[in-house]
Image (cartoon, rainbow, N blue to C red):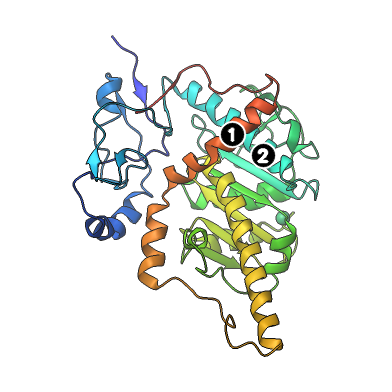
Amino acid sequence: MRPALRLPSSLGTRRHLTSQTISTIRAFSTSYRQANRNYATVTSGSPSLTVTQTIGESSLPFGYGSYTPSSNKAQDTPIHHIRIPAFASLTAERNFRKLHHAAGLRWLGHNGYNNEGAGGHVTVRDPILTDHMWINPHGKSFSWMRPEDLVLINEDGQVVDGHGGNMHSVNPAGYVIHSAIHRARPDVVAVVHCHSVPSKAFSSLGTMLEPINQDACRFYKDHGLAPFGGIALEKHVEGEHIAAALGSTKACILQNHGHLTAAKSVDAAVFLFGAFDRCIQAQLMADAAVAGRKARGETTGTETIKASEEVANYTREIYNDEMAYIMFQSAFEDVVRASGGELSMRVEGEIARV
Ligand SMILES: [Zn+2]
């Protein structure tokens, strides 16, 4: 008997819409948006069948890279796609999450997001003990993180022994903020929060990200704004306020603090964290340019042009969760190659999907 193949809980199904027109894809957007939040787990005896069967509602109307855009015609011969893999076992999925967790932390470290020391944390839900989460050890460099360095904590914030976790202290604020989100959002696998200079500035404005470019549309009406209630150490209520402000969205501006992202994979959450930060920088630059042009009496370029409601909504729906995972894979490769063999590209029991 073949071993059961377990699709990752973060995975939706893909439906090839090779004969669909763009307008039809747009019509899918609303139902897709909800369906993509579904949290599906499926087992089957046949890998080849399992990876293509429908899990509840269709959740991915756009097969990224799976058809020839110029002709809207299906690819005749199989090609390799980068996709969220399936797993031979829950242990394989745990090891995959820990590998990508460590790689995500390294990427954040390489990009300067570890510069506030302990003021940064990444959590990943354990696929076996689903009310437990993995977190980076307190005070350790992101840039050298290995899967075995990660710490497993339970829902009470206690460091857990016996499951391969590093018996090391963790940042209490990381537990307070992230555990509240993991509790409130069973669909969320990973949460990323660090302090960046742009987010320190932008979060003081009390305003939202505007759809002033394609990438910012990814977050259009899909992020929250949490008022600042003080450092979240023993104040558990602060974590709950942030979880409430995040709601069902993918990101949250923490006023007078920074920002945070949540997703169905750590790859997607890390990618979205960097993407949100770059969008913040772009908006600050554009708004500063507008102010400068107005001040010197220019008659053009005195207001940023925003994407229309329809275009912003459409673009956000295309940027689904698996897309965010895919977007991070080139960075994952960079990190693995730069690790000099400390990290691997794959874990045992990881099964590529086509
Ligand atoms: Zn913080």
Q: Image quadrant for the N terminus?
A: top left
In the image, residue 35 above or below residue 336: below
Image coordinates of residue 194 in percent, x first then y, are 70, 51
Name the quadrant containing residue 195.
Answer: bottom right
Amino acid type assigned to the residue bearing label 2 in the image: Trp
Residue beneath disc 2: 107
Residue at image point 73% right, 67% down: 201
Which residue carries the number 1 mark? 332
Query: Could you tell me if residue 167 is visible in this image?
Result: yes
Q: Is mark 2 within 8 Å of ligand 1?
A: no
For the residue marked with disc 1, what is the amino acid?
Phe
Q: Quadrant of the C terminus?
A: top left
One can see residue 180 in this view: no
**For the residue carrying disc 1, how many other residues have a C-alpha within 10 Å: few (<14), some (14-19), or many (20+)?**
many
Judged from this view, the residue extending furthest toward the left is: 19
| Horizontal relation, residue 58 to residue 246: left or right | left
Q: Give the percent coordinates (x, y) of residue 203.
A: 67, 68
- Tell me whether circle 2 and circle 1 mark residues in contact (CB < 8 Å): yes
x 64%, y 58%: residue: 259
> 173 or 76, which is in the foreground?
76
How far apart in space, not on screen, are marks 2 and 1 (Cα)?
8 Å
On screen, 117 above or below 47?
A: below
> Tag 2: Cα neighbours inside 10 Å, few (<14), some, or many (≥20)?
many
Is 107 left, or right, of 323 in this rendering?
right
For mark 1, give the secondary structure.
Answer: helix
Q: Does residue 319 appear to the left or right of 45 in the view shown?
A: right
